[in-house]
Structure formats: structure tokens, C-alpha cells
Amino acid sequence: MSEEQRAAAGGEERGVELPAPTAWPLVAALGIALGFLGLVTHVALGLLGVALALLGTVGSVREVIPVERRETVPLRREPPPPRTRARALPRLGEERHRMRIPVTIHPYSAGAWGGLAGGAAMAAVAVSYGLVRYGSPWLPINLLAAVAIPSLAHAHLAQLRAFSGAGLLLAAVIHLLLSGGMGLLYGVLLPMLPGRTWTAGALLAPLLWTGLLHPTLSLINPALAARIDWIWFVASQVAFGIVTGLWVARTEQIAVLQRLPFAERIGLEVSGREEDER
């Protein structure tokens, strides 16, 4: 009796033919990623990526040409679904409505304005570093602007200590955008953290910025990476976190629409509410 006949008679179940598993597409994907990474790092890494991409492509093609590799996967009977027993969940807050947390939040504008205030404190610490370490307030400003100005990225120390109008303008724009964006993120995240807002901000700022920039700063801004002092950098982030956290903490919280029924939240007129019945 053939396999098809046994399956028709209810005997042994047939398997399903599927393409055979292969790792060549992963090798090709890794090669493509390394190839693009080599454009901003080193040519040797790019050549390695090209070689892996070609190797993975050839290997993938050979899996299907001239004959596609396939394997038979046996079918298995699924186990019966587990038996469950429904039980009532405890409710918080009002008897008729489950409480949703948080019910009050800080306005998003508080985070944006707090970020700008914290950015001013961070800039004060950075300028103090330039004065104390190099005797010039313009050096940290020019180092920040070096991310987009090639002349500053390859400038000598004497040029970085000098005033640059383009560097000042570009650094101000970058600093305002980053400070406002991070402040907005703080305004959303900090009220969810335990403890006082400004203490959480003082700890969260150095961890976020230092952890993000330490491994990538040499790629983003080589000039800044060559002259950065991480102690002063962390101090500037602590100043940003404290000022932004205090600003957000002192703003009045606003109520959210979590307690309202869904129909009222989308603007429908609902009858039969307790307020209407009274």
C-alpha cells in the first residue's frame, strides 16, 4: 500500500514538503550590512561585506538551481486545548469602571520648555569647561558644530579656540533641537518613574546620553571624540537632568480622559449617564 493509500485509509499521516532550511540568506544580509558600514568606517570592512554578500547570494542560488532542495516535514497531531476556569478579576477604584493609570500627566509643553531650560544649564557647564581647560568659551561650541562643518572637524586647537560665526549659529540650532526633543521625552517618561522627578532626571540624563554617545561618538563627531572630557560631559548631563526635572515637576498636572467612556472620548453624545439621571 502506497503512502497516499495509507493516508486515505486513516493510517500514517503524510508529511508536507517544504524548502530545505539554509543560512545563506543570513550570510548575504550580513555582508550587505557590513558593506554599508564600511562606507563610514574602513574599506577593509566594506570589502569583507561585499565578499560575504556575494558568497551568500551564490549559496542561495545554488539552493534552488538546478534543483530546489526540499525536505519533508511530518505532520503532528495538535494536543487538545487546555481546560481553563474563568474567574472574576479584582477591580480598582470605582465599582462601575476599572481605574486606568495614570489619570493625570504633565503637559507636553512642560517637557519642551524644561528641556530648553536644561539646555541652558548644560551649555553653561560646557562653556565653563572650555574656559577652565582651554581658556576659550568657543571651543565646546565649535566642537559641537564640527559634526556638520568639515573645516572645524579637521581644525587645529588654535582654530577651535577662536570665534566662528557659522559654528555658533549651527551649534545653537543643534543644541536647541536636541534639548527640546530630550525635554519632551523627559516630560513623558519622568512622571512614570518612582521617586522625585528631578532626582530621577539627574540619574537618567547621564545614563541615556553617555550610554548612547560613548560607543558612537567617534563616528558621529570625531573632533569632539578626540577632545571630550567625560567627567565634564556627565556633569553637564546632570545639570540638564536636574533643571529639566525640576521644571517638569513644578508644572501643574492635567487630567487625562481615561475615566470617560469610549463614546464620550470620541465625541458622541451619550444618554443615560448618572449626571443626566440626577
Image: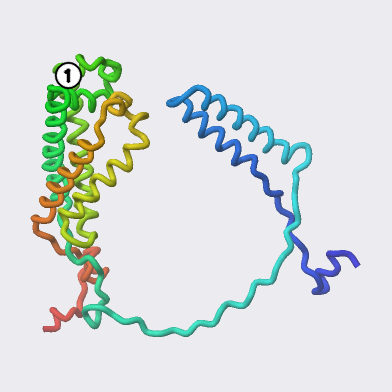
Q: Secondary structure at mark 1?
A: helix
Residue at (37% x, 37% y) in the render: 215
Residue at the right extreme, as displayed? 1
Residue at 22% across, 78% down: 93
Q: Is residue 17 above or below residue 119?
A: below
Seen at 20% across and 67% down, the residue is: 103
Where is residue 167 shown, x and y percent of the image?
Answer: 19, 21
Against 65, residue 97 (above or below) is below
Q: What kind of residue is marked 1?
A: Arg
How far from the left and from the top, in percent, is residue 238?
18, 44
Of residues 105 and 27, the one nearer the viewer is 27
Q: In the picture provided, is 225 more to the left or to the right than 79?
A: left
Residue occupied by mark 1: 161
- Can you say which quadrant of the picture contains the N terminus? bottom right
For image coordinates 18% across by 39% down, the residue present is 236
Q: Could you say where residue 188 lies in the image, as x and y percent from the top left? A: 22, 54
Q: Quadrant of residue 41?
A: top left
Image label count = 1
Q: Is residue 117 left or right of residue 29?
A: left
- Count residues near mark 1 (Cα–Cα under 10 Å), then give few for <14, some for 14-19, many for 20+: many
* Residue 266, image quadrant: bottom left
Q: Residue 41 or 19: which is nearer the viewer?
A: 41
